[in-house]
Image (tube, helix red, strand yellow):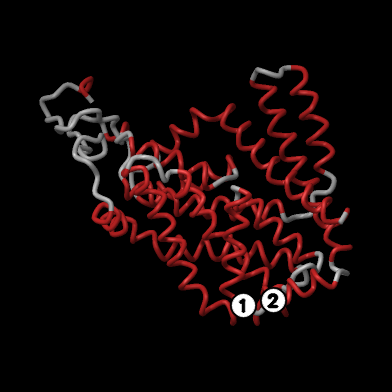
Amino acid sequence: MQNLLHLLAAISLLVWATHKVRTGVMHVFGANLRSLLAGGTRNRFTAALSGMGVTAVVQSSTATALMASAFVGQGLLRLSAALAVMRGADVGTALMAVLFSLDMSWLWPLCIFIGVLLFVARKNERPGHVGRILIGLGLMLLALRLVVQSTTPLLQADAVRMLLASVGSDLGLQLLVGAVFAVLAYSSLAVVLLIATMAASGAIPLDVAFGLTLGANIGSGLVAALTTASSDVQVRHVTVGNLLFKILGVLMALPLLGPWIAYAQPMTTEPGHAVVILHLVFNLFNSVCFIGWTGKVAGWMQQWMPTPQDSPAAGWQRPHCCPPRRWPCPVRYARPCTRRTSSKAC
């Protein structure tokens, strides 16, 4: 019982530390990140790169999805561009998972020490928020070590072995459990790191870890969709479209999972690294395959969930008077401006 409490405490610390990093980054770089996200959407590829960069900083594709959907709801961003942003956002969070899976046992004490000094000295100023970020990073690395220490004694229990055996025999159950974990943790990054850590410690077989990882990807899209469930229709277009991309990607990846397991198990000495590499390869595969489908899926979303005509997004068009460098223009009216309209009207 005590070991189970230690494991639950370690998982809670990992989720809380991820949240602290995200809030600290938004305090320090929030305005710049929003400008990067809104300004880097000239085409679908630059939109994907901007989404990748923002997500790598905030360490949450859900936060990027909420920002992009808010811009679409305000009429500042096209739906197809927002969906392209999310293609890059998934790659960004996968890259961060690979980074955190490396051996950084020397880093967490340094991050916590420097972070506490900055936070105590300048709590409500920019150095204090930077200290909050460092504390969160240090606690994330510490939580991963605690997860390893807590899962080792639990593996000796017969009930745990029976539970893992039942999950390992059903791929659908693995996807469901991974999705539920991501929804409860509100972070696919934390769940993927947890799965990688448990696979590295031998708590779960590699094939089970792969199934849970694919389920966590679906769960990350489901989190954003549930968060915006009561929002305007044009806001939900982004999150539901992103969830559709994830489900289609998992369906395409399932037939390839068997050959990947057969190839990865002999080549990988560290099961934890194999999990985060699968997570990265899956998101790269998903983004490359569907980057050209953003316009089509945007059309599907608008057909399935029609946008009210009085919303800002319904009358959104590219004004002729807006300079290309300032695209997209913050349009607040239904009619498009003409070439004779002054630039101040945009």
At a point 82% along the width and 36% down the height, the residue shown is: 110
At a point 72% along the width and 80% down the height, the residue shown is: 266
Q: Amino acid at mark 1?
A: Asp
At a point 49% along the width and 54% down the height, the residue shown is: 222
At a point 42% along the width and 54% down the height, the residue shown is: 242
| Circle 1 crowding by C-alpha within 10 Å: few under 14, some 14–19, many from 20 | few
Return the residue at label 1: 170
Q: Amino acid at mark 2?
A: Ser
Q: Is residue 265 visible?
A: yes
The front one of 99 and 229 is 229
Relative image position of residue 33 (x, y in whole percent): 49, 34
Return the residue at label 2: 166
Quadrant of the snapshot with the C terminus = top left
Asked whether, in this view, residue 261 is left or right of residue 284, the answer is right
- The quarter of the picture where residue 322 lies is top left
Asked whether, in this view, residue 210 is left or right of residue 294, the answer is right
Q: Is residue 50 visible?
A: no
- The quarter of the picture where residue 116 lies is top right
Q: Is residue 266 above or below residue 191?
A: below
Q: Are marks 1 and 2 in contact (CB under 8 Å)?
A: yes
